[in-house]
Amino acid sequence: MDRYLREETNIDEDDEPKKMLLQSSIANIKRNTREIEPDSDFTAKDFCLQAIVYIQSVLNRRVDIRVDQMVQAGLVEEVWQIFIPDANYTKGIQLSIGILEMDRYLREVINIDEDDESKMLLQSSIANIKCNTRLLICHEFDKIQRLIYDKMWLVHHIIATYVFKGDRKYVVDEAWRNTIFQPRLDIV
């Protein structure tokens, strides 16, 4: 399951077994829209794979939106303020989201005269932030799973994917209150 959490929803053309499994699962879902027949080839593992792919795609979209919001809110300027050319990226504030990923951009933008090249470097840095944030989320999820399974911790699961499907702010806010906030209050 770990492996699937780290993968994008796109399937490499050379990964034929996974591609066939996914196509078979999708065909089974379409064929059995409401109920899966007992003699179906569709297994619980197939269902989990489908759920993970769906959740991962929602999560990836949310990460992209959130990083874009951070950039619009001034992430680049904040990183400029704390940028140290010979910094150690293994401890302290240098571990913050965006600092390591923007290092090349910050070093080279001073020497670049062309706007196009600096925009490309910035876009590359932002793409790296998104990718590394996804990896960070997967690592955190793995840690939570270890606490649940190794330590046998009781954890309440609140599924938030529905919240992030909304495009308008008031829809997201309302979904957040009903799907996340209120259930958490009820648990506590």
Image (cartoon, grey):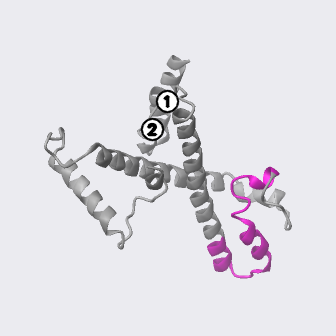
Residue 114 falls within the magenta-colored stretch: yes
Q: Residue furthest bottom?
A: 113
Q: Which secondary structure lies at badge 1?
A: helix
Q: Where residue 180 is drawn, which disc sits there? A: 1
Amino acid type of the residue tagged 2 in the rendering: Val
Q: Which residue is mark 2?
A: 163
Give the mark nearest the N terminus, 2 or 1: 2
Residue 169, placed above or below residue 100 = above
Proximity of marks 2 and 1: CB atoms separated by less than 8 Å: yes
Q: Which secondary structure lies at badge 2?
A: helix
The part of the image, by quadrant, that contains residue 141 is top right
Residue 166, placed above or below residue 122 = above
Q: Nearer the viewer, residue 7 or 128?
A: 7
Residue at x-position 49% and y-position 32%? 176
Q: Which residues are magenta?
A: 92-121
The part of the image, by quadrant, that contains residue 188 is top right
Give left or right: position of 183 versus 28.
Answer: right
